[in-house]
Amino acid sequence: MTSPKRHSRIMAPRRAQSGAALYIALIMLILLALIGIVGMQVATMQERMSANFQSANMAFQRAEGNIRQREADITNGTSYAYEDCANPVDPTVWANAIPATTVSDTRTVNISICTAQCSAKAGADKELCNMFRTTAFSRDRDSVADSSSAAAVDTIFIKP
């Protein structure tokens, strides 16, 4: 009787192995690290963009709130000084000239007086002849040092 032959594994000598798996694994790790770094940079940039958008939106909403408060004052008859019609002011120039220490400011001109015209709603009744141009400037925070954005809003309001 003969014994069954055993199959033995044939192994290459150690000096013939080149270690390609190690090099491929290292290259893959470097690529994954680079992808991770790029992903973190993109996430950081998106976070900054959203923070800037939020600041700009806060400044706009605060300026819009100042406008709405002035319109409510006009409607309720609260007295305040209208600006002079003789010196028309460009809203952009006005907003750019506001000192860096100012958090918010609002200006109102009764354009019915300036133009000597009434809205169609007023008709012939000169008492109802009340069209107002209101411009408001505001920063996104109550403190100038903490602010990062500013906004100006210009509207025309017809007193009901």
Image (cartoon, grey):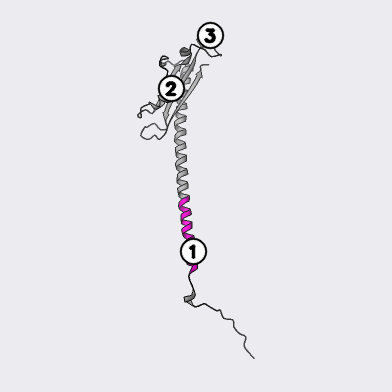
Query: Relative to 86, is 104 above or below?
Result: below
Amino acid at pointer 1? Ala
Query: Relative to 109, is 17 above or below?
Result: below
Q: Bounds of the magenta span? A: 19-38
Q: Residues within 10 Å of mark 2 (few under 14, many from 20)?
A: few
State which quarter of the image contains the N terminus.
bottom right
The prevailing secondary structure element of the residues shown in magenta is helix
Query: Relative to 1, is 9 above or below?
Result: above
- Closer to the N terminus: mark 1 or mark 2? 1
Q: CA distance from mark 2 to mark 3?
A: 30 Å
Amino acid at pointer 2? Asp
Residue 79 locus on image (x, y percent): 42, 15
Q: Residue at x 46, y 56 (%)?
A: 33
Q: Residue at x 46, y 40 (%)?
A: 49
Name the foreground residue: 25 vs 80. 25
Residue under label 3, please give it. 125
Q: Residue at x 41, y 24 (%)?
A: 93
Residue 63 locus on image (x, y percent): 45, 27
Where disc 3 sits, the SS reads loop
Residue under label 1, please give it. 25
Q: Residue at x 45, y 34 (%)?
A: 56
In the picture, residue 59 is in which quadrant? top left
- Closer to the N terminus: mark 3 or mark 1? 1
Q: Residues within 10 Å of mark 1 (few under 14, many from 20)?
A: few
> Residue 90 has which mark?
2
Amino acid at pointer 3? Asp
Query: Relative to 22, is 102 above or below?
Result: above
Q: Magenta stretch containing residue 34, yes or no?
A: yes
Where disc 1 sits, the SS reads helix
